[in-house]
Amino acid sequence: MPVRIAARFIAGTKKTLFSLDHFNKTLPLEIFSLFFRIPTDRINWTTSSFLIGTFILTVTAVPLYLWYFGFDWFHFAVAAALLTATGFSITLGYHRFFAHMTFRAKLPVRLFVLIFGAAAFENSVLMWASDHRRHHKHVDHDDDPYNISKGFFHAHIGWLLFKLWPEPPYDNVPDLRKDPLVMWQHRHVHLIAVLVSFVLPTLLGAWWNGWVGALGGFLIGGVAKIVLLQHCTFFINSACHTIGRQPYSKKCSARDSLVMAVLTFGEGYHNYHHEFQHDYRNGVQPWQWDPTKWLIWTLSKLGLTSDLRRVAKETIRSRMAEQNQSQSLSQSV
């Protein structure tokens, strides 16, 4: 019986049973797909290997290093500094500046966020902004790259593990394609990422404590920092479209979450952001935790950013009133 099943399975591929070369090359993937129904031809092996590999190192090698060599504040200080610089480069730079153009930025700011944004290993700003603009245009529909309707896992990380087919063009970022700095980063993003996220903390660790410090710098200031930062970013696409309040609109799944705001430098007020995507603030209320808006405002006072775009208070109040009225009507029905 097992022989018959194997024969039928291989015959279904329209290849001869006696083609040993084909048998050795294709059977493992075919069996894998048969049992797990995973589209192996669409797996993005490079991205998948990196995301899974760094996660495994974080939950195995990092604890082993700490157990064997002990806690060293220097590595965590380096990780915190790089996490802050890289995190703000994603929220302030990739997201609110390049993807939405909610303010203008001078050269030092632009160069900083392009260099440290690359260190997040979230692709070039050209690719990131293109995906994000497509997300806003088609939110919760098939053309949304991280469509929550396809499940929490897909929105969180699954969309990165598999290649989009057909691959979307960069036809929604013509402004960024004209920017020489953006295209420079796009061409060299992987080199910049490796140098800033891996080489820099490793060299700092070696300077601090020889080869033991170098290993700690690589694992804590490099690998663990990347995993933490990436999954905080990913939670905006998954958790912020699943859990939280919708005080401004129910036209899409986006929600406001204080927890996510704390974890992502203020990006958690996602319902407001989807309703008013061209506002430089996500946490629009003065008391809402949004360090990215505070940093943009501070930089404007230093002359490094300008033309900060804000939605009028009357418009915001009107939208909240409409939403409250709509909720009241739905509850009464």
Image: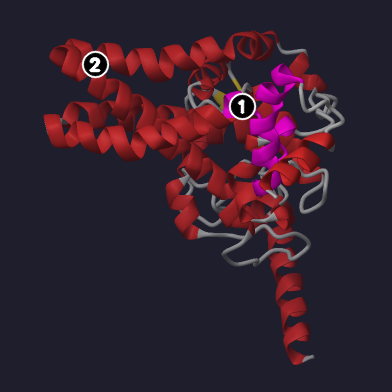
Q: Earlier in the sequence, mark 1 or mark 2?
A: 1
Q: Amino acid at mark 2?
A: Ala
Circle 2 SS class: helix
Tag on residue 177?
A: none
In magenta segment, residue 49 = no
- Residue 37 lies, in percent from the top left, at 70, 47
What residue range appears in magenta? 19-47
Residue at mark 1 to residue at mark 2: CA–CA distance: 28 Å
Residue to which mark 2 is pinned: 214
Mark 1 or mark 2, whichever is nearer to me: 1
Report the side of 186 relative to 330 (left or right): left
Residue at the image position 67 percent from the left and 57 percent from the top: 254
Instruction: Give the dominant element type of the magenta stretch: helix, strand or loop.
Output: helix
Q: Quadrant of the C terminus?
A: bottom right
In magenta segment, residue 29 = yes
* Residue 254 to residue 98: above or below: below
Residue at the image position 54 percent from the left and 57 percent from the top: 285
Residue to which mark 1 is pinned: 45
Q: Amino acid at mark 1?
A: Trp
Residue at the image position 83 percent from the left and 33 percent from the top: 13
